C-alpha cells in the first residue's frame, strides 16, 4: 500500500510504483488543497514524481534524510517547498 | 523477466525482423534511399530498445552494432555493399534464431556471448573510420577518456558543488532524456539516475511546460535529467546500458568545472533562449549576503516563470511578493518596495502574467550588479517563459523523430491484434454450434414420427432455419477473421531468392503477384514450406547460369514468378520460371532406372503424366546433390504437404522454356462438406470434393475383366470396387436390383465404389484421428453428426493404395 489517501493528506509510503501515478493524479485533482506526506517514503517512481512536479501540491512532511527520495527532493530543490 | 512482457517483445521483435528483412532488400535494390534507410534504422533501433528490457546482453549488442552501421549509412558516411548486406542479414538471422531460443527456454544459451562477439566484431569492422557521428556510446568509445567540451548546462550546477568536484578531478556529465514511452518499457529514470555510481550532483526538470490538467498524461515521460558522476566512464556506461540511446555522456575536465576558470560570458549565452544562472555576478566584490539575496531574487523570477495551474497562481504571486519585500528591504531599494503592492495587484489579476513583478526583480538585479558585462536581455520575457522552461534539454525534438511509437496510437483502435488461439477457440465454438444446430432436424423428425405432433415439427424446422442462417453467418464472419493474405507466405522469398541466386551465381528476378489474395491462416501457413521448396527448386534446377542462358538466346537474368489468385472457393498459386524446363523422356527413364515404374507402365504414360513423376517418393533429377534442394527430400514432400492441406499440385513444363507448378488449395479448411454413404449398417463420410458423381446402375452393366469388375461410363472404363469388401464388412450388396455407385476421383485416377445407399451431404468439422485410431490412415478423420453420432470419414487416397 504505497499511497494512503487520508482526508486531505496523502501518505506516500515505501516505494511508490508507476501505477500510483494515476491514482495520485486523480486524488490531487479532486483535492486541490491536498498535502503530501513523504515521511515514510523511500522511493518514488519517475511517473509519480512527474505528477507531483506538475501538480505542485503542498508538502506536509519531508522525506527522512538519507533515503533515496530525499536525494530526489534535493535534485528538485525548489518545487516542493513553496507555500 | 515477466512472461507476458517477453511474449509481447517476441511478437514485436519478429514483426520488426520481418520488416528489417524486407526493407534491407528493398534498400539493396533501390540504392541509397533516405526514407528506406530511415525506416530500417528505426526498426533496428526499436528492436534494440525492446531487447534492453531483458537480460539478453548478447542480443542487444548485435542489434546495437547493426544500428551503428545503419546510423553511419544514414549519415552518408558508409555505403552498403552486398557483402555488408550479407553480414547484416546474417546477423538478423542470428537474432531470429535467438528469438526462437528465448521463446522456448526464456533465455539465451551459453554460446550466445561468443556468437554475439563474433557478429558484433564482424559488424563493427564494417563501420567506417569517422565514427564520431555514430549515436550514443560508440562515439564515446573511440574517444576514450579524453575530456569533451563542457556541456552548456554545466553552469546550472551550483558553484560550490562545481568547486568541490573540480578538486576531485574529471567527472562525467550525463544528459538523460528519457523516451516518452519509457514508463511502458519498464524504465524508471529516477531510479536509474539515483543509483548511478558515484553520483555527485543531479537535477531533474520537465523538458516542456506542464500541460493543462485535463491533458496531462502521467505516463508520458517528459522529464529531463542532468547528472554528474565521478565514477569511471565504463561504470557509468554500464549502468546506463539499457537507456544508452537516450543518454548523452561527456567527460568534463576538472578545469571546466571550476567556476573561476569559467569565462564570465560563457560561449552559450547568445544561443540560450534564456539567460540563466551565469548572469549572477560571481565577482569577489559582492559579499556573501548580497550573493544570497541575488540568488534568491533569481529564484523568485524562475518561480514566476514556471508553469502553474491557474488556481495556484494567486498563492504563488503572494508568496513571491512576500519574499521580494524582504529581499528589497535587505537591498535597501525603498523605491521598489513602494512599487511592490501595485505590481502584485497587477500580477494577481492576470493569471500567468507577472510582467510587473518580473520587471521589478530585473531592476533589483540590475542595480546590485557591479559594472555588468551586459545588460540582461529580458524584454521578451513572458513570451519566452511560456514557451520554454529554463531546463529544457536541447535534443528532444531530434529524439522524438526516431520514435516509432508515434503513429501507433491511431492504429490501435482500428486494428486489433488477437492471439490466434482465441480465434481458434471461437472457430471451435462455431463448429460446435453448427453441430448442435444440425440436431434440430432430427428433433423435428422425432416430433412427427414418435410424438405425432406435426405443428411442433414445423415450428422446430422454422427455428432451425433461423438458427442455421445465424450460424452460417457467424461461421463466415469467423472465417473472415482467420483470413490472411497469401503474401505473408511470400515474405521470405525475396531474401531467399537473393541469397540463393548469389550463392549459385545466377541472376534472378522475382515477381510476386496477387499477394493480397486471402486464405485461411492455416492454409497459408501450410503453404509456406512447400512454396519455399518449390522456389528453391526453380532456382537450383530451373534457372540456368547467365552464360547458359545467353547461349540459348535468353536474357541473362532469369525470372521466377509467383502468382496467387482466387478461383471460387480455392486459392490457386502458380510458381513459374523461365529456366531450362524438364524433359519427360528423361524423367521416364529415371523413374524406370530407380524402379519406380514397370516397363509397361512406362509405355502407357503420357508426357503430362511423366512430368508428375517428379512428385514420386525417392525421385531426384539433379545430377549432383547441391545443398539447396537435393537434400534427399524431394518433391514428394511438397506434394504430401499440399495434400495434407487438401490441396492439389500439378506440374507443367516445356523443355527449354521453363516450368510451372500449380497449387490449388481450399480457401478454408475449417468446415468440410462430406457425403454420407451407407455400407451395411454403418455410415461413412466421403469428402465431397472427391465425389465426381453418384449413379444407380443395373447389375448387368458391371463388366468382368478377369477377376476385376469394371463399368463403362461415357465411354470410359472405370474399375469398380465394392466398399464392403474393401472395408472387410459382411457382404450386403444386393444380388438383385440396381447398384448404388459412387464415382470418385483421387488425383488423376477415377474409380467407382459400390455402396448400399447414398445419403445427404453435411457440413462438418473434420477432426483428425487421435490416440489408437491415429494409426489407421484409411480414415481422414471423424466428424460429429447432428444426432450425436460419430461419422468416420474415409481417406480415399489411402483406399486407392489398398486396391
Image: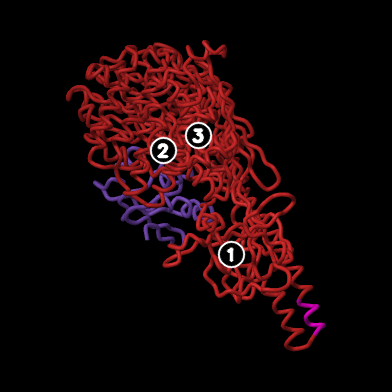
Chain colours: A purple, B red
The location of residue B368, given as percent across then percent down, is: 39, 20
State the CA–CA distance, disc 1 to disc 3.
50 Å
| Residues under numbered marks 2 and 1 in contact, where contact means CB atoms less than 8 Å apart | no
Q: On the picture, is B350 further left or further right than B296?
A: right
Q: Give the letter of the chain under mark 2.
A: B
- Splitting the image into 4 quarters, where does residue A80 fall? top left
Which of the two discs, 3 and 2, labels the residue nearer the N terminus? 3
Identify the main secondary structure in magenta.
Answer: helix
* B240 shown above or below B795: above
| Residues under numbered marks 1 and 3 in contact, where contact means CB atoms less than 8 Å apart | no
Residue located at (71% from left, 58% from top): B473
Which of the two discs, 1 and 3, labels the residue nearer the N terminus? 1
Give the farthest residue toward the front: B706
Residue located at (74% from left, 80% from top): B445
Residue bearing mark 2: B594
| Residues under numbered marks 3 and 2 in contact, where contact means CB atoms less than 8 Å apart | no
Which of the two discs, 2 and 1, labels the residue nearer the N terminus? 1
Q: Nearer the viewer, residue B207 or B324?
A: B207
The location of residue B792, given as percent across then percent down, is: 56, 67
Residue bearing mark 1: B429
Q: Are marks 2 and 1 on the same chain?
A: yes
Quick one: SS at disc 2?
loop
Which dot marks residue B588? 3
Amino acid at each position: 500500500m504505497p499511497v494512503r489517501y487520508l482526508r486531505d493528506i496523502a501518505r506516500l509510503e515505501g516505494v511508490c510504483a508507476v501505477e500510483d501515478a494515476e491514482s495520485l493524479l486523480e486524488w490531487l485533482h479532486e483535492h486541490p488543497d491536498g498535502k503530501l506526506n513523504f515521511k515514510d517514503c523511500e522511493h518514488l517512481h519517475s511517473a509519480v514524481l512527474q505528477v507531483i512536479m506538475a501538480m505542485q501540491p503542498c508538502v506536509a512532511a519531508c522525506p527522512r534524510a538519507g533515503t533515496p527520495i530525499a536525494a530526489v527532493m534535493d535534485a528538485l530543490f525548489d518545487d516542493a517547498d513553496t507555500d | 523477466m515477466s512472461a507476458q512482457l517477453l511474449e509481447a517483445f517476441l511478437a514485436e521483435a519478429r514483426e520488426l525482423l520481418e520488416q528489417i528483412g524486407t526493407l534491407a532488400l528493398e534498400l539493396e535494390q533501390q540504392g541509397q534511399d533516405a526514407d528506406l534507410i530511415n525506416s530500417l534504422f528505426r526498426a533496428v533501433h526499436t528492436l534494440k530498445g525492446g531487447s534492453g528490457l531483458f537480460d539478453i546482453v548478447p542480443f542487444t549488442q548485435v542489434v546495437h552494432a547493426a544500428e551503428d552501421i545503419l546510423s553511419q549509412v544514414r549519415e552518408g558516411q558508409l555505403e552498403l555493399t552486398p557483402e555488408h548486406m550479407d553480414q547484416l542479414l546474417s546477423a538478423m538471422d542470428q537474432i531470429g534464431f535467438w528469438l526462437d531460443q528465448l521463446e522456448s527456454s526464456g533465455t539465451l544459451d551459453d554460446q550466445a556471448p561468443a556468437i554475439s562477439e563474433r557478429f558484433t566484431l564482424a559488424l563493427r569492422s564494417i563501420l567506417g573510420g569517422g565514427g564520431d557521428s555514430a549515436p550514443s556510446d560508440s562515439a564515446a568509445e573511440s574517444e576514450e577518456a579524453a575530456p569533451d567540451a563542457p556541456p552548456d548546462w554545466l553552469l546550472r550546477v551550483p558553484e560550490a558543488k562545481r568547486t568541490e568536484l573540480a578538486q576531485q578531478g574529471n567527472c562525467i556529465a550525463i544528459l538523460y532524456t528519457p523516451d516518452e514511452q519509457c514508463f511502458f518499457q519498464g524504465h524508471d529514470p529516477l531510479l536509474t539516475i539515483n543509483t548511478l555510481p558515484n553520483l555527485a550532483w543531479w537535477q531533474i526538470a520537465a523538458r516542456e511546460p506542464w500541460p493543462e490538467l485535463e491533458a496531462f498524461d502521467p505516463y508520458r515521460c517528459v522529464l529531463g535529467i542532468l547528472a554528474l558522476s565521478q565514477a569511471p566512464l565504463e561504470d557509468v556506461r554500464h549502468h546506463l546500458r539499457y537507456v544508452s540511446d537516450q543518454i548523452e555522456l561527456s567527460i568534463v575536465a576538472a578545469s571546466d568545472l571550476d567556476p573561476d576558470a569559467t569565462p564570465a560570458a560563457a560561449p552559450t549565452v547568445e544561443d540560450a533562449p534564456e539567460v540563466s544562472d551565469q548572469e549572477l555576478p560571481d565577482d569577489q566584490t559582492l559579499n556573501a549576503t548580497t550573493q544570497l539575496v541575488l540568488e534568491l531574487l533569481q529564484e523568485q523570477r524562475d518561480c514566476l516563470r514556471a508553469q502553474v495551474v491557474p488556481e495556484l497562481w494567486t498563492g504563488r504571486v503572494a508568496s513571491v511578493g512576500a519574499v521580494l519585500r524582504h529581499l528589497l528591504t535587505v537591498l535597501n531599494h525603498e523605491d521598489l518596495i513602494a512599487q511592490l503592492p501595485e505590481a502584485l495587484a497587477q500580477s494577481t489579476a492576470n493569471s500567468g502574467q507577472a510582467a510587473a513583478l518580473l520587471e521589478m526583480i530585473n531592476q533589483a538585479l540590475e542595480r546590485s550588479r557591479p559594472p555588468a558585462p551586459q545588460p540582461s536581455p529580458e524584454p521578451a520575457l513572458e513570451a519566452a517563459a511560456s514557451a520554454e522552461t529554463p531546463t529544457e534539454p536541447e535534443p528532444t525534438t531530434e529524439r522524438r523523430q526516431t520514435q516509432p511509437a508515434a503513429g501507433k496510437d491511431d492504429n490501435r483502435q482500428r486494428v486489433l491484434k488477437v492471439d490466434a488461439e482465441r480465434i481458434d477457440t471461437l472457430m471451435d465454438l462455431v463448429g460446435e454450434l453448427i453441430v448442435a444446430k444440425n440436431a434440430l432436424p432430427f428433433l423435428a423428425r422425432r416430433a412427427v414420427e414418435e410424438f405425432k405432433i406435426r405443428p411442433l415439427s414445423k415450428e422446430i424446422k422454422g427455428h432451425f432455419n433461423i438458427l442455421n442462417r445465424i450460424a452460417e453467418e457467424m461461421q463466415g464472419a469467423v472465417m473472415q477473421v482467420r483470413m490472411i493474405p497469401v503474401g505473408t507466405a511470400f515474405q521470405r522469398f525475396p531474401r531467399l531468392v537473393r541469397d540463393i541466386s548469389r550463392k549459385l551465381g545466377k541472376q534472378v528476378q522475382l515477381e510476386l503477384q496477387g499477394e493480397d489474395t486471402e486464405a485461411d491462416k492455416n492454409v497459408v501457413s501450410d503453404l509456406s514450406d512447400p512454396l519455399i521448396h518449390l522456389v528453391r527448386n526453380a532456382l537450383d534446377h530451373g534457372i540456368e547460369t547467365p552464360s547458359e542462358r545467353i547461349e540459348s538466346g535468353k536474357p541473362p537474368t532469369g525470372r521466377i514468378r509467383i502468382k496467387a489468385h482466387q478461383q471460387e472457393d480455392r486459392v490457386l498459386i502458380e510458381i513459374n520460371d523461365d529456366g531450362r524446363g524438364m524433359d519427360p523422356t528423361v524423367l521416364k527413364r529415371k523413374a524406370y532406372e530407380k524402379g519406380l515404374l514397370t516397363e509397361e507402365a512406362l509405355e502407357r504414360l503420357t508426357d503430362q503424366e511423366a512430368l508428375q513423376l517428379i512428385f514420386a517418393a525417392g525421385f531426384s533429377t539433379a545430377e549432383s546433390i547441391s545443398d539447396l534442394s537435393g537434400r534427399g527430400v524431394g518433391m514428394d514432400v511438397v506434394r504430401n504437404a499440399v495434400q495434407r492441406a487438401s490441396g492439389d499440385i500439378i506440374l507443367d513444363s516445356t523443355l527449354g522454356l521453363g516450368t510451372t507448378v500449380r497449387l490449388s488449395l481450399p480457401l478454408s479448411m475449417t468446415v468440410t462438406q462430406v457425403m454420407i454413404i451407407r455400407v451395411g449398417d454403418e455410415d461413412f463420410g466421403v469428402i465431397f470434393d472427391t465425389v465426381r458423381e453418384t449413379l444407380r446402375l443395373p447389375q448387368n452393366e458391371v463388366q468382368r475383366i478377369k477377376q476385376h469388375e469394371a463399368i463403362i461410363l461415357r465411354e470410359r472404363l472405370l474399375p469398380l470396387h465394392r466398399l464392403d469388401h474393401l472395408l472387410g464388412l459382411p457382404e450386403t450388396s444386393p444380388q438383385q436390383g440396381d447398384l448404388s455407385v459412387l464415382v470418385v476421383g483421387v488425383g488423376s485416377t477415377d474409380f467407382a465404389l459400390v455402396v448400399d445407399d447414398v445419403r445427404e451431404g453435411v457440413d462438418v468439422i473434420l477432426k483428425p484421428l487421435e490416440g489408437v485410431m491415429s494409426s489407421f490412415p484409411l480414415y481422414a478423420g471423424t466428424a460429429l453428426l447432428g444426432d450425436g453420432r460419430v461419422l468416420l470419414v474415409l481417406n480415399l487416397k489411402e483406399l486407392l493404395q489398398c486396391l
